[in-house]
Amino acid sequence: MSPTANATSAKGLAGESDLGRAIEELAECSQLRPLARNLFEITFQSPAIAELARPGEFAQIWVERSHIPLLRRPFSFSRADRRDGTVAFYLGVVGDGSRRLRALSPGDRVRILGPLGRGFTLPETPGRSALILGGLGAAPFPLLAERLRQLGEEVVWVNGARTADELYPDELIPPGVQEIVQFTEDGSQGSTGRITAGLLPLLKEVDRVYACGPNHMLGAVFQLISSSSLARLPLEVSIEAPMGCGFGTCLGCAIPLRADGTNTEPVIGLCCRQGPVLRGSLLDWEQLLLQPAHLA
Amino acid sequence: MSTLSPPFDARVDLGRGLVLKNPIAVASGTFGFGFEAEALAGISHLGAIFSKGTTPLAREGNRPPRIAETAAGMLNSIGLQNPGVEIVCVDYAPRWASWPVPVLVNVAGADIAEYVMVVERLTGVSGVAGVELNISCPNIAHGLDFATEPAAAARCVAAVRAATDLPLVVKLSPNVTDIAEVARAVEDAGADAVSAVNTYVGMKITLPSRRPVLPGMGTGGLSGPAIKPLALAAVARVRRAVQVPVIGIGGIASPGDALEFLVAGADAVQVGTANFNNPHASREIVEGCLQYAQQHHLRRFADLRWQELEFPGAAEEGMRSD
């Protein structure tokens, strides 16, 4: 490999998560809060990880020492409370891993490995942020909104979902958020339509955008912003990829990256080390959207 | 205050001067080049590290999806993503040189010339304790040819043997009619040890899509606890076929799993897929095995071996006396 090739490595493009910060903690479930449909929020006593977790980073959770399902499941931190030593995750039952978590009761223990991955970049000087969340993509945003508010940032919370009961519940949105805008595809709450339909006017007054949701939604948000007069607005997205280990050894969660604004051949990065949060302009969206997002 | 029983010796001699402090190693493709684990969970407890498969030039690997979970197992089709042997020698090996654990580089190639090229480059590099020849990757075109045809496997191993004096382990594929035949062929061609088994070719299909999860032909390599009984049988068969040390691999996730492979005739083992789920797996397995040895007053781990493997016919005699 030539030095030139090395310079355009995934690490060179996007940096790499610091594995030295990750620890494993035996964590006790302290609360399971059922929400609409198959959605729920689960809280664990995990003081060491709660101390470390930053918005956009994730944890690998092992429900029990069982071979089915074999692999841990990665979840972004929804909350990390340093005072009471808890971390919380917002998720829906979509497969074996999340079903096991849904079946836990307070007092049950799991092994949590984290924090892993690279999270959102927090602003150096306060301004106004738009948080764009689709469906389960709400997961990292309660923690992000809380930390942004602590920095004096104004927060616009833009939530889209198929139906009203798939919107992130109003009562769980952190206090201090300046503006809440909602879209449902069936019109059962907020504006009717997809989030991209009414997005641009909401972004006129913001200094930066953070987005998380299905990869195809993130691609649409990136496309919309980058082809508009707001193309220079900083955009960070938290993407998904089928993940095995979460710390860079299985090479399962490959994602296509390339230098900002170039059309060069994509470089293979890892969602778990270069992501899950990346500048929107670093992703080869065309290649990324060919891939299924979840561990089937 | 001495005890009457002789002290326990956990060391394992893999030949050509390569002595492991204990028989627990980690498998190629499940541990990168060791640096993630070094940061996350430490590596000093290990008997040896087998690196990610390394080719002459950098490889980007296969297009995603690359992994799929199955019952007690997983399929992978990574496609030998690696930075190429030059980066391994220049950037990685100097860091390995200070580690208290020997690192063996797993070597892959498209033809014999490529295997020889990589091994020649690695020879004499400080930090490289040996090589493991991956003649059995199921995820690259032609990768299985050397593994399934004993004469082709022997030609590849003989060419590499002539090119290096490094300890040479040959990793065997289970996707063959008779793994013993291939094991004998590579032993005759100069392998210092054999490791068995690589992954089994498998497929996962989802009904909603009516197609395989993995791209291309839809197949990948199956690993994890699902393959352990198959791997134990393969290891016992290889043990009977060769004199050189055998390294057992296949679904080891607990100390008990590792000890079972030692019973089945393995001299050492590699922990693989378990490293993904539990970065502390290999440490827990080392500690558990040493504890077992102490509790059961072993002198060495080889004491565990099933007697029938040492003295063929013993099992039949046992049956007759029943």
Image (cartoon, rainbow, N blue to C red):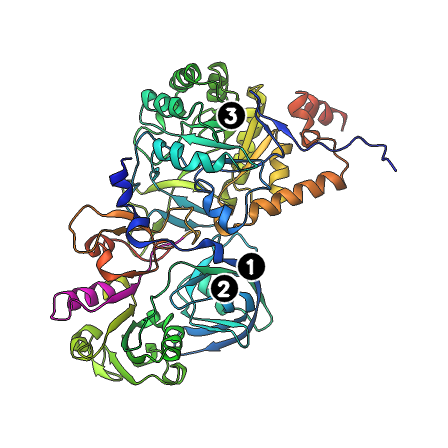
Magenta segment includes A231: yes
Q: Gap in Å between the C-alphas at discs 3 and 1?
A: 34 Å
Q: Which residue is mark 3?
A: B194
Instruction: Name the residue furthest front.
Output: A125
The residue stretch that appears in magenta:
A218-243
A70 and A206: which is toward the camera: A206
> Is disc 2 in contact with disc 3, using a CB cutoff of under 8 Å?
no
- Disc 2 marks a residue whose amino acid type is Arg
Q: Counting other residues with Cα less than 10 Å from the Cα at mark 1, is it few (<14), some (14-19), or many (20 or more)? A: some
> Is disc 3 in contact with disc 1, using a CB cutoff of under 8 Å?
no
Magenta segment includes B181: no
Q: Which residue is mark 2?
A: A100
> Is disc 2 in contact with disc 1, using a CB cutoff of under 8 Å?
yes
From this view, report whether residue B147 is shown above or below residue A215.
Answer: above
Answer yes or no: are tags 2 and 3 on the same subunit.
no
User: Residue B249 location, x and y as percent?
Assistant: 52, 35
Element class at badge 3: strand
From this view, report whether residue B251 is shown above or below residue B137.
Answer: below
Element class at badge 2: helix
Can you tell which of label 3 and label 1 is closer to the viewer? 3
Pick the quarter of the image with the C terminus of chain B.
top right
- Disc 3 marks a residue whose amino acid type is Val
A269 sits to left or right of B291? left
Chain ID for label 2? A
User: Residue A135 location, x and y as percent?
Assistant: 32, 72
Q: Which residue is mark 1?
A: A64
From this view, report whether residue B123 is shown above or below residue B43.
Answer: above
- Disc 1 marks a residue whose amino acid type is Glu
